[in-house]
Amino acid sequence: MRWRLAAVAVTLALTAAACGTTTGAVTDRQEPTGGAPSPAGAKEVTELPAANRDDSCDPTASLRPAGPPPAPRAFPGGSTMAAIVARGKLVVGVDQNTLQFGFRDPRTGNINGFDVDMAREIAAALFGDRNAIQLRVLTSSQRIPALKAGDVDIVVQTMTINCERLKDVDFSSVYYLADQQILVRADSGYTGVDSLAGKKVCASEGSTSLAKIVNQDVEPKLIGMQVAGWTDCLVMLQQNQVDAVSTDNTILAGLAAQDPTTKVLPGSLGQEPYGMAMPKGQDDFVRFVNSVLERMRGDGTWTRLYDQWVAGLLGAGTQPVPRYRD
Amino acid sequence: MTASTLLSLPRQEPPGRVGELRSLARTTPGVLIFCMVGAVLVSVLAGVFTAVNVQSRAAALDSLANRSGELSVAAQDIYRGLSDADATANGAFLSGGREPANVRARYESDIAKAESALAVAVAAREPADLADPSSPLGVLSAKLSVYTGLVETARANNLQGLPVGAAYQREASNLMRTELLPAAQDLYTTETAGVAEDQDDAAALPIVEVLLALATLVVLVYAQRFLRRRTRRRLNVGLAIATVAAIASLLWVVVATIGVMANVNASRENGSTQTDVLAQARIAALAARGDETLTLVARGSGGAFEERYEKTQQELAGGDGLLAEARGLASAPDVVDAVATATEAQRSWQQVHTAIRTADDSGDYPQAVTLTIGTDPNGAATHFDKVDEQLARAIEHTQSAFSDEVSQADSALTGTVIGVILLALVTAGGAVFGIWQRLKEYR
């Protein structure tokens, strides 16, 4: 029986081959490869400088505020604040992809979130108007170039303070303390960094998360997949193009909230202190922003904004204690 | 042929035969036989070759009317459908919330048009032509459904208020711009080259036909001169008929071909050349519209899209841009008028675009969005639609000019193949009849 089947199979194959050759080249047909396309700019990280190892400074110590913020629009001539007020709006670099921090609500088209409201508080302190604000959407890797080029006055975009970045920009005091964690598909069986050895892990280009992923101490190394925005990572996870996404729990919670088949693994890869970034050399502006942050800690604004945006994702939170230098 | 030559020189039989033919050629009946055979051979050959050439000319015209012409239109429809679908999907994303029904309808109709044109393009090929998945049609067939899938995923997420929808929209648009549109562009280039090739074939000079007809005439004239000298009869009816038939065939072919060449050249000048420039202009307008929308979608980091927008508008409306070129080429008043209206609408669009950039750059994003996708008669959408409509109107006109000229060319060849063959038979028959009359006298 088996032989007969084999004989039939061979005959069929020969017939098919013969037919193929007579009708010409149909047997040469190459299998098209299926699969999802990649988001624009997605690529594997093959080489990355050993970042985040720079501990030459005390990154979270920011400039001490000179007392409470002055009344809106009442700034000394020649100050950075006076220049911004004269121009009419505070130009803020934000994200549009991070749920609850800086995200575009597809139903209204407006960009909202904890970071955006924090920036609005700065605008209110400058102009007496929360809406005297112009948002510019930046990707992680565009933040520092935008500050250096003067395209934005300030970046409020889940941005980690570290010594390397302090060479290019100045930071406010810490306004939020996040942890880097890992997001996987709930049924994938991954438990942590060790189980992901040699697997593809997605992070935003130019983020501190990406550097941390590829520098994890496991063999074989995690393969970093860099994309432009955090939601691109979720797309790639949903399309099975990466095995995990790793970044701050703030961002991951926002991604997990958009896809109930994913989960955030417990365990922190390290703390990520967020600061507002400003162009280098505007000490008056840094001190002013720190004074506004100080006031927000005292009058409950921070807690109100946290409860409004973040508590639903991450539970109750405590505001970080600022550290200063003079 | 004597027995001795056969016996003593069997190997020199061919020279013997040649010698015999030579001696035959010195006699009058010999010459007449040569003339008869020559006339028959040359006229039949001329008939066959001329018929074949006319047939291939007719085939090229048929291809222009039914294949390459249609395919270049299909390729254009694919490009336009895809490009407009992408701009519309990105625009729908800008509007926030559920997109207006007419926007969704426009996207759906763009995709339907592109898919139906793609079916036409695919149906014109052999399966073997589609074996390579990286060929333009391979890419379009395999990836268009991936694109629409991503757009629907984006839409479903958007409706639920999830920001990941925007990421799916970006991925879809990236697929469109990096793979689908370049493939559609390649296809368009190939199909327009096919049209030009068919036009070249249909309008080739009839050199072979004319030479063969002249050769037939030379043989016939020689035979008649020979007979006149040898027989002192002025007119040989058979040969005269043959000559008239040969001249008629030559004239028919030359007149028909000149007609075809004139029509084909007109199909170029009034048709395909203009269509190509107009189609390029339409594609440029679409690309600029897409970039205008994407600049806003990128929300402050769309500098690259804005740069490309300016570059494309320059190609479209610059001093030696596509609109100027279309205007220079335009021959029909309707086309001149459509191009002029499109040029005007482009100028208004450009003015609104400046206002959009001013609004966006000064932080008035909602105003920029309203100016870009709003249905206001002074919005960018209205002006762009007008540019697109007018160019479409001009293209419709040049395409129908193209079809008219091609079908006129085709009718100029009607009956030519049969006619040429019949006249060749008349020529051959006349020559045989005429010479046979004289040849009989030598029996």
Image (cartoon, helix red, strand yellow):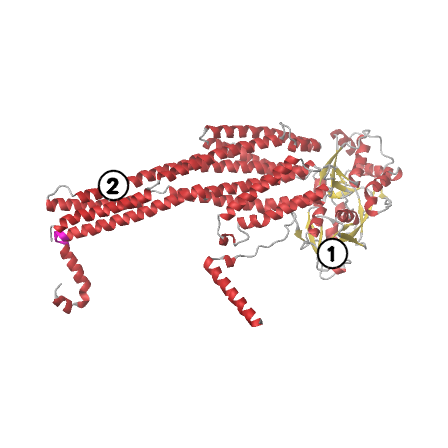
Amino acid carrying label 1: it is: Asn
- Could you tell me which quadrant the N terminus of chain B lies in? bottom left
Q: Which residue is mark 2?
A: B247
Query: Callout 2: helix, strand or loop?
Result: helix
Residue B39 on image: x %, y %: 22, 49
Left or right, B319 with reference to B219? right
Q: Residue B405: percent from the left, percent from the top?
A: 41, 36
- Up-down relation of residue B435 to residue A137 (above or below): below
Q: Which residues are magenta?
A: B25-29
Asked whether residue A174 is in view, the answer is: no
Residue A215 numbered mark, or none: 1
Residue A19: x %, y % from top left: 48, 60
Task: State the image coordinates of residue A306 (x, y, percent, origin top left).
Answer: 84, 42
- What kind of residue is marked 2? Ile
Q: Secondary structure at mark 1?
A: loop
Residue drawn 56% across and 69% down? A5
Is residue A231 inside the magenta stretch? no
How many residues crowd around disc 2 within 10 Å: few (fewer than 14), some, or many (20 or more)?
some
Residue B27 forms part of the magenta stretch: yes
Looking at the picture, tell me which residue is in the foreground, B372 or A15: A15
Residue for point 82% across, 45% down: A312
Q: Residue at x 14, y 48 (%)?
A: B438
Looking at the rendering, which quadrant does residue A106 occupy?
A: top right
